[in-house]
Image: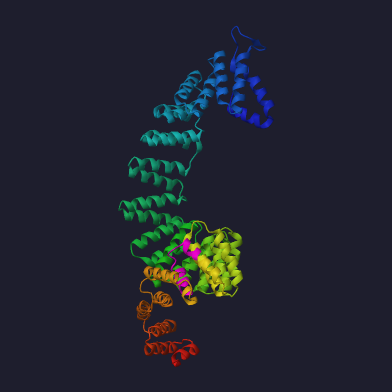
Amino acid sequence: MRPSSRRSCLSAAGWPCVLALVLSGCAVLGGAKKGGDMVMGGVDQAFHKAFYNAQVAKLKGDRAGAKEALLSCLDADPTEAVVHYELARLEREAENWAGAHAAILEANALNGANAWYRKELAEIAFELGLYAEADAALEWILENKPEDDLSARRLLDLRTAQGDLSGALEVVDVLEREWGPDPEWHFDRHRLHMAAGDVEAGLEALVRLEEDFPDVVEATLQRARILTSLGRQQEAESALQTALARSENGRLHLEWAHILTRQGDTDGARRHVRIAFASDEVPMAEKADIAWTYVELAEIQQDLRPEAAALIDLLIEAHPREAEPFDILAALRDIEGDTEGALDALESGLELDANSPERWLDACQLAIDLEAWDAVDQLTERAGIRFPNLPVFPYFRGLAKLENGDDRGAERQLKMARNLIVDRPEFESDVLSTLAQIAHDRGDHAESDQWFESALEANPTNILALNNYAYYLAEREVKPERSVELAAQVVALSPGNANFEDTYAWALHQAGDHEEALTWIELSIAHGGEAPGATVLEHAGDILQALGRLDEARGRWTDSLDAGGDAVRLKAKIDAE
């Protein structure tokens, strides 16, 4: 009974067909019983019933029941090879390899002409490491069923792994006779010779492949690379030139460009690279890798930028429906300082493939660099619809709305972003500190303080949150100890920053520690360069005033006025008695 017959019958007619199959096949499976219960035609009824029960149990997934029924079959007739085969399969599924091996050996002993039994024997022998036995089983299939290319491939791999080169080559010869000429057989011979260390025979296999299949450029490419690795450069070049004379395949041009580049002939190499870029034979991914390399080099070597641009144009022309060439174009324009052009290129890429969050993110970043907040708003809205679970897009959209004066809209987007963030404390802290800034700007200081505290809980080293929160508390003259604590952390995290030193000085001043405040405000002025800001100069005057040094204070206020400080407030301080 052939497994294929059972499968086709079951799919066509279902259970009734299975029953009919088992019933009709019983005479073949069971034979005539000697002295037992008989039915018409001499069918062994006990055997038939047991085999039927085994098949039903298998269909139900009852392996134990199937095995018990099959053993009953053997009680009725121990010479049925198919029963031993079925037992072997059950034992293999249960990973009882010794039992499977014994059963399949018995099946083959009873019927050595069954290819299915041989295949099963090979698989079990492989598992047990009995490679000679597996080889013998597969060789029988090769000789008797050469059309079974899967078994032939299995034998080929086995002999290759065992180092049996001549035996492996015999398999290739059989495959070629059975299936006809094919480049695959030449490549197999090449691979086998190379595995055995016979480089010359491996090269000869490639030469034969080129002769029989001149359009298969992989043979030439492989031969040229091997020859180059052996230092036989003239032979490699000759192989490529001969192939180029008969074919304009772009992959050959690309390989020749590599050779010319190594020889220092960059102009000649560029010409062949351009031919390769216009060719359909070179995969787009390979061209893109080369183009990216040119762009990376062009960032440092500006003279390469025109060539990079020319290659990108060829790439777009050859692959007009691909998005990646526009990503490369955007990168080139960005390093050239053409941010608007870079954004246009990414927009073109998004029209072709909108399923890349990285492409949307790059476009948003370029729009932010341009301070094109309407564009940021539109890009992030579209990206957010496509990628609703990514927090970066509502975050950017919140920033855009904030810049456009829509504080409520910004707050909604930022809260949405915060709800989407998972295990990214630094990002969460940035979102929370922005929410704190919005609340501060509208005068809701209690809510602002809560957002700042949450931001620092998420990331205690968020310098901007620390600095801004400390300064706002000092300005409002509330929680002076907390303000000083926060500002002290800032100057410890970023020493020498004039702005942060000003915050610390102001927090100390508002907390009543004017002497220490003077030290830090003078450091801030010193680190502020030749033109300190109006705010820090005014703070210096206020601290000096608190110390009773009014003349020095008026000097600092005057400096602040000259630096663009608030004229009304500063003149009032200067003129006060």
Closer-to-camera residue (440/323): 440
Q: Residue at x 47, y 67 (%)?
A: 331
Instruction: Please tell me whether residue 286 is drawn above or below residue 412 in the rendered image.
Output: above
Closer-to-camera residue (61/11): 61
Point out the stretch of residues depicted in magenta.
453-472
Q: x, y percentage for residue 247?
A: 46, 56
Q: How is the image coloured?
A: rainbow
User: Which image quadrant for residue 545?
Assistant: bottom left
Residue 413 placement, left or right of 130: right
Instruction: Please tell me whether residue 372 is drawn above or below residue 417 in the rendered image.
Output: below
Residue 458 colored magenta?
yes
Q: x, y percentage for residue 109?
A: 48, 19
**Magenta highlight: main SS:** helix
Instruction: Please tell me whether residue 481 is drawn above or below residue 117 in the rendered image.
Output: below
Residue sitting farthest toward the top = 35
Quarter placement of the N terminus: top right
Q: x, y percentage for residue 251?
A: 45, 56
